[in-house]
Amino acid sequence: MRDSVARVLPEWNKNLPLYNYLYGIYAFALVEMNQHLEAENYAKQGLDMNRRDGNAIHSLAHVYEMTGQFDKGISFFENTINDWDNNNFVSCHFNWHLALYHIESGNFEAALELFDTKILPAYTASGATYDSFDASSLLYRLQLEDVNVVEKWSPVSKLANKHKDNHMFLFNDAHILMAFLGNGDTNNAQEFLTSVQDFTRNGSGDVCRIFKESSENLLGAIRDYDVKSYTEATNSLQSVKYKLDKIGGSNAQRDVFNILLLNTAVRSATPDHIALARSLMHEREAGRRNSPLTERLRRKLNDRIQVNGTM
């Protein structure tokens, strides 16, 4: 994606229609290659040409998320709300990005308000797969923060049910499982996992190959975390950590699995997982300096060490 735009961008005339969109698309590709400074530069150039450029807005949102500039992200979205909130296609996802900044900052009430007033209504209206990720991911991240969202899962689980046999991407299926387990739909969850197994055995093509490679461990980790089997969840998720870039979604979207692995390692009874948790925190801080979320997890880990005496 990055290279395809880089090849043609110098050949375009800035007076041509939609020229600014090249900058937003290029910026997003740069974000996904972890070239955040360059991405920010191109996104801002795109917005200078058209402040309503959804690609440029989206790319800048990813820059602020992936570099830990959460306050700047909140300010950006709140100050530009009239440029994007009336766009039915992207407004749900942009509100999800705004909610992530609030979760990171520890303002869970603000994130829940966005779920209730923006994200769930958009998902209910569209029923679209791309809106389902936002709803499931937001609730799951709050759940990992020990926020009680039990009463929020029911409509998300109900809407996810119609996608449970699609198996378009493993990223999608992970969020479907989150919804079923979050709502306590154990029967649906088991039927869904059986459907995944059938697809993995009988399917073909690149998507099926990725399922065969990672679905058992990724979905197994989500299931194990739900039943407090933290050691098993940690082992399963750690084994596919560096394969998850193939499953779909962006770096920011897949970060939910990094946060899950941190939580499983912090809660695991296995001493080696204490060292793993510390290493994962260092890794996260390398990209997100001064992350309140990481600090909260560090406090949980230190509290556990004090209680159990595990070093």
Image (tube, rainbow, N blue to C red):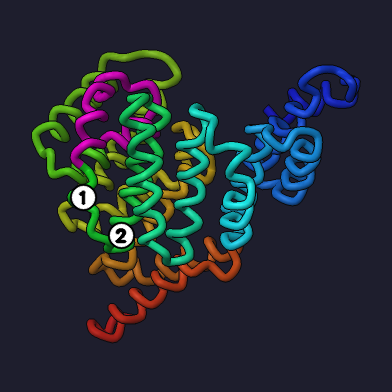
Place residue 1 in its image quadrant: top right
Residue 98: x %, y % from top left: 50, 50
Residue furthest left in the image: 187
Q: Is residue 14 above or below residue 118?
A: above
Residue type, label 2: Thr
Q: How far is mark 2 from mark 1, CA to CA?
A: 9 Å
Start-end of magenta stretch: 154-176
Are the residues flagged by discs 2 and 1 in contact, CB closer than 8 Å? yes
Q: Which residue is mark 1?
A: 224
Q: Is residue 250 left or right of residue 59?
A: left
Residue 308: x %, y % from top left: 23, 82
Label ID, residue 264:
2
Which of the image's four quarters has the C terminus?
Answer: bottom left
Q: Is residue 9 above or below residue 36?
A: above
Residue type, label 1: Asp
Residue 276 seen anywhere in this rendered image of the structure = no
